[in-house]
Image: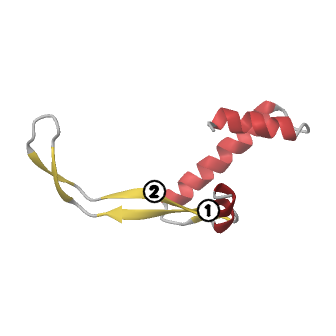
Amino acid sequence: MTKSELIESIAAKITNFSRKDIEIIVDTVFLSMGESLSEGDKVEIRGFGSFKIKRREGRQGRNPKSGESIFIDSKKVPFFKAGKEIRERINK
């Protein structure tokens, strides 16, 4: 599901708001989640899952084009862990 499909799905269920209002709400939720993660906080949505930042240490890698050995710097990456309810729904 893409963001625009999510907006359309919500707009079909909630007729009190215009599509533009729903788009602003969805953008605000995603922006807030991104800001929270960038500050190092965890984002948890009960029944769905949680997002957190994990640190990936630097390591030796290889340039696939030239085969040259290179060092890959450490970095932070987002990590998602599905909640129990969504895992059960998927596995039915």
Question: In this rendering, which labeled residue sits more in front, label 2 or label 1?
Answer: 1
Image coordinates of residue 21 in percent, x first then y, are 79, 36
**Quadrant including the N terminus:** top right
Q: Horizontal placement of 11 versus 42: left or right?
A: right
The residue at which mark 1 appears reads as 49
Give the mark, 2 or 1, whose residue is nearer the N terminus. Answer: 1
The residue carrying pointer 1 sits among few (fewer than 14), some (14 to 19) or many (20 or more) residues within 10 Å by Cα, namely some
Q: Residue at x 12, y 49 (%)?
A: 70
Looking at the image, residue 40 sits to the left or right of residue 84; the answer is left
Look at label 1 and name its amino acid: Gly
Q: Which mark is residue 78?
A: 2
Residue 54 quadrant = bottom left
Tell me the amino acid under the disc marked 2: Pro
Q: Is residue 23 visible?
A: no
Image point 87% across, 41% down: which residue?
A: 14
* The quadrant where residue 84 appears: bottom right
Q: Are marks 2 and 1 in contact (CB under 8 Å)?
A: no
Question: SS class of the residue under badge 2?
Answer: strand
**Residue 63 shows in the view:** yes
